[in-house]
Image (cartoon, rainbow, N blue to C red):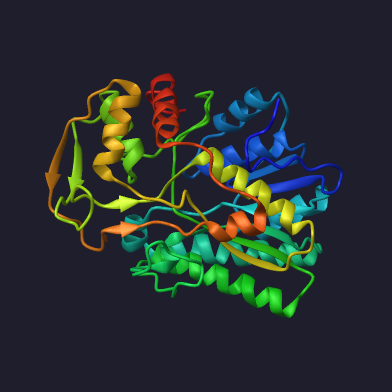
Amino acid sequence: MAQPTGYLRIKNIMTTVLVTGGAGYIGSHACVELLNANFDVLVLDNFCNSKATSIKRVEKITGKSITLIEGDVRDKATLTMLFSDHQIDAVMHFAGLKAVSDSVNNPLAYYDNNVMGSITLLEVMSEFSVNNIVFSSSATVYGFSDDKPIPETAPLSPFNPYGHNKRMVEQVLADISIAEPSWNIASLRYFNPVGAHPSGEIGEDPNGVPNNLMPYVSQVAVGKRERLSVFGNDYPTIDGTGVRDYIHVVDLALGHVAALNKLMQGCGLLTLNLGAGRGYSVLELVQAFEASTEQKIPYEIVNRRAGDIAIYFADASLAKQVLGWKTTKTLEDICRDAWRWQTKNPNGY
């Protein structure tokens, strides 16, 4: 059976990939695609915003096993033991806190987790001469960009601690690549990951009230939330609501495998956007969800949120050119897969 665009099967070059934060939303989907590409997968996770159950589900989906270690990426002793006990060829680094609003309220926790944790990981990688890393960055590094779509060359001006965290780690990686040309690094700036694995076995399982649109819509549909609050309907967009670039999490995971394949060729430093390359408004997403699932989503228009901007979507052409990767999932796929996950797992894991 033909594989979808962006699927890269890698043979007998690298063996083991350490996935930090591999039990989380994006990390667990990356684990599926790594196993599908015949990598051995080693996961390190402290489960502060994830569940070990997700790894069992990944093994169920793929029919393959994962070595799972509970531990914190900031703990150098744990990392040293892990690298001593396993022959690790590359790292996919997802571990970190990820809520923008929480980063504003708890900046020290975010700098400690996201920046210091990354530095500790990189120190241990250097000690063990493991010099291949795919870093989970974010479009938040662009801040209030006027570019539509946003290319990798857009100015970087993050406006919250989470975005500053990502920007700082990117800078550390760039400095390493200059000092140590043997390193191969991919910093992947992605936009709005949504959806779930088509099996419905793994998906987004937010703690408490969801910070992101799609899980909130799903929870309204399943009856956990009364209605969706739409923040503003007076933006200069197709229907007055904010426009964002939504990328299916499986497409995103395949982008990570494609980036890892590129690292194997000795690529040096890569910085790439991963996105669908087009935007949908809040109401367009709601309408697509209703059409795909036959569920009505009650919503109300409320005041704009401070810091929100009208239109934000990726120029993803460089990833296509460099990696041979592009998204293949539609907005309808996103909605159907998110709903399948929600109905099979109404209370998450």
**Location of residue 168 with respect to 64 vertically, above or below:** below
Image point (40%, 74%), residue name: 157
Residue 161 found in image quarter: bottom left
- Using residue 250 as the reference point, say whether residue 87 is left or right of it: right
Furthest toward the right, the residue is 12
- Using residue 320 as the reference point, say whether residue 348 is left or right of it: left
- Using residue 242 as the reference point, say whether residue 259 is left or right of it: right
Residue 205 found in image quarter: top left
44, 223: nearer the viewer = 223
> Where's the N terminus, which quadrant?
top right
Image point (49%, 69%), residue name: 167
Task: Name the spot of residue 23 as percent of width and height, x first.
Answer: 57, 39
Task: Name the spot of residue 186 as percent of width and height, x first.
Answer: 64, 61
**Location of residue 77 with respect to 59 vertically, above or below:** below
Q: In this rendering, does residue 23 appear at all?
A: no
Task: Name the spot of residue 11 as percent of width and height, x first.
Answer: 83, 42
Image point (19%, 45%), residue name: 230
**Location of residue 31 with respect to 136 vertically, above or below:** above
Q: In this rendering, does residue 142 appear at all?
A: yes
261, 141: nearer the viewer = 261
- Using residue 184 as the reference point, say whether residue 333 is left or right of it: left
2, 252: nearer the viewer = 2
